[in-house]
Amino acid sequence: MKSIINSVNGWQNEDQLTRNISVSRSLFVLGYSFLVLSLTLFGCNGSGSNTSVSNTDSKTNGSSSNQKVIKIVRSKQLTALAVLEKQGTLEKKLQPLGYKVEWPEFAAGPQQLEALNAGGLDIAATAESPPVFSQAADVPLVYLAANSSDGQAISLLVPTKSPVKTLKDLKGKKIAFQKASIGHYLTVRAVDKEGLKLSDVESVFLPPPDANVAFSQGKVDGWFIWEPFVTRNVQNKVGRVLLDGGNGLRDTNNFYSTNRKFYQENKQAIKIFLEELQKAQVWSKNHPKEIAQLLASVTQLDPPTLEKMHSKYDFSLVPITESIINKQQQVADKWYSLGLIPKKVNVRDGFLTPKEYEEITPQEVLGSK
């Protein structure tokens, strides 16, 4: 099976640090990869009790053997998507249509879209860059909806006792981030803003769990990462925030995406998903104390801390407009100019028509245009 990550120019040359992460973590990742592959090859062939939604035309008769499975990524952040899973309302809405909801977990956006391409995920939630890299690998991706940018929830951490005061102090230093993630994109934005080039810092490509280890061990000088990793490291006095994606540094949106086949075969389920997600957005915005209690176990942070973090999130779906599409094209052009994707990408290939968006987007969201 073709790997999205390995098919994009430059992704095969990882930093030496990656090879220094513990053997136990490597074995875990390897085992997990085989598990995902096994589920993809054998769990979706129609012979098991949970038939893949994209490979079944069966009608529900109340038995689990005829249920269609929709796999939505699990969020471990302070997000409405995490609320939606915890509240269980989506399962109730989709059950009459014969769907069972599963919530697989992935380290970051690129891994989600790898799974989306392999059949291990049906709906992903990522920042702006993973879809571009996916499109560059010829994946038939579809942008379903746009979410608020939540720029303040992504930060550049430096060690607590680091002498670094500004980004320019990191020139020639190691900055870790997940390749093709929002951390990668904001590093590009930040160095541009300071009149530097990406080559002026040493990029260390590590997924969040491995980057967390490297950062805590002092093997990198900075780490561009999202919540709750930011708050955990600050609370544990391991790191401090040098800058975040707020104040105009982040100029893009988050996206919910799927593949073309899933979109074409499951429009009603997608519509229901977005409607329930919008309800969770509104509830999350208006109930800071309740969401903190609800997601304490998910984020591994105490409710008072989560209440403080609440202001970092906008909790809103936004309509997909020409402005959003054009900005996404600018992101794609930027990655191409840096030589990090092998060809120019026309992001419009992944966007639906205005009429198609009207059919699946909640009216409340459409009305905010």
Image (spheres, rainbow, N blue to C red):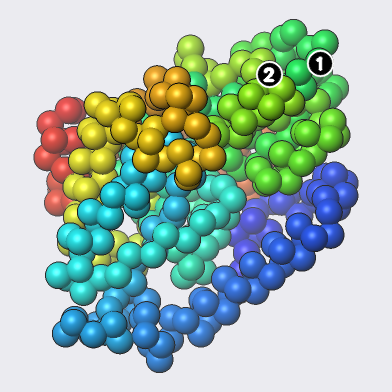
* Relative horizontal placement of residue 57, taking residue 61 as reference (left or right): right
Can you identify the residue that label 1 sits on?
162
The numbered disc on residue 240 is 2
The numbered disc on residue 312 is none
The number of callouts visible is: 2
The residue depicted at 71 percent of the width and 64 percent of the height is: 28
The residue depicted at 71 percent of the width and 39 percent of the height is: 212
Q: Is residue 20 above or below residue 114?
A: above
User: What is the three-letter code of the residue carrying label 1?
Assistant: Ser
The residue depicted at 52 percent of the width and 63 percent of the height is: 115
Q: Are marks 2 and 1 in contact (CB under 8 Å)?
A: yes
Q: Pinpoint residue 61: horizontal percent, then vertical percent.
A: 16, 85
Q: Tag 1's secondary structure?
A: loop
Question: Which image quarter holds the C terminus?
Answer: top left
Question: Which image quarter holds the N terminus?
Answer: bottom right
Label 2 crowd (10 A; few <14 / some 14-19 / many >=20)? many
Residue 138 seen: no
Label 1 crowd (10 A; few <14 / some 14-19 / many >=20)? few
Name the image quarter holding residue 91.
Answer: bottom left
Residue 78 seen: yes
Q: Pinpoint residue 203: horizontal percent, then vertical percent.
A: 76, 34
